Amino acid sequence: MDEGELSRRLELLRVEHRDLDDSISALRESGTGDQLQLARLKKRKLRLRDEIARIEDELVPDIIA
C-alpha cells in the first residue's frame, strides 16, 4: 500500500473506532445491553486500535537519534 492508501485506510478505521465507541456507550446507557455483545464490541474496538497504531507506525518513519 502506498502512503495515500494507508492514510485513507487510517481515516476509515478511526471513523469505525469512533462509531464503536458511540455504540458501546449507547448500549451501556440503555441498560438492556447484552454483556456478550458489549464484550464483542469492545474486542473489535481494541483490534481497530491495534491496526490504527500499526498503520500510524508505517506512516511515521522512525527517527534515529
Image: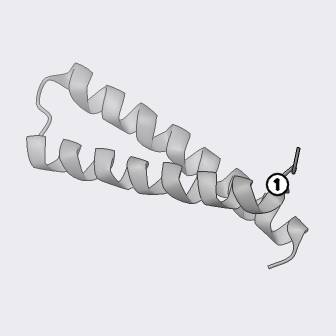
Residue lying farthest to the front in this orientation: 65
User: Which element is circle 1 on?
Assistant: loop
Q: Nearer the viewer, residue 16 or 64?
A: 64
Q: Position of residue 10 (x, y in %)?
A: 70, 56
Q: Residue at x 61, y 53 (%)?
A: 52
Q: Position of residue 64 (x, y in %)?
A: 87, 51
Question: Against 8, is 22 above or below?
Answer: above
Q: Residue at x 81, y 58 (%)?
A: 59
Q: Nearer the viewer, residue 14 or 19?
A: 14
Q: Which quadrant holds the N terminus?
A: bottom right
Side (left or right) of 64 relative to 37: right
Residue density around tag 1, few if under 14, some if 14–19, many if 20 or more, within 10 Å: few
Number of marks present in the image shown: 1
The quadrant in which residue 51 appears is bottom right
Q: Position of residue 41 (x, y in %)?
A: 30, 48
The quadrant in which residue 5 appears is bottom right
Q: Position of residue 19 (x, y in %)?
A: 50, 41
Check the image and tell me how it is coloured: one colour
Side (left or right) of 65 relative to 29: right
Three-letter residue code for mark 1: Asp
Q: Residue at x 31, y 44 (%)?
A: 42
Side (left or right) of 26 relative to 20: left
Question: Against 8, is 33 above or below?
Answer: above
The quadrant in which residue 23 appears is top left
Residue lying farthest to the bottom in this orientation: 1
Q: Which quadrant holds the C terminus?
A: top right
Q: Residue at x 25, y 20 (%)?
A: 29
Tag 1 residue: 62
Side (left or right) of 57 relative to 29: right
Q: Nearer the viewer, residue 51 or 40?
A: 51
Question: Against 54, is 46 above or below?
Answer: above
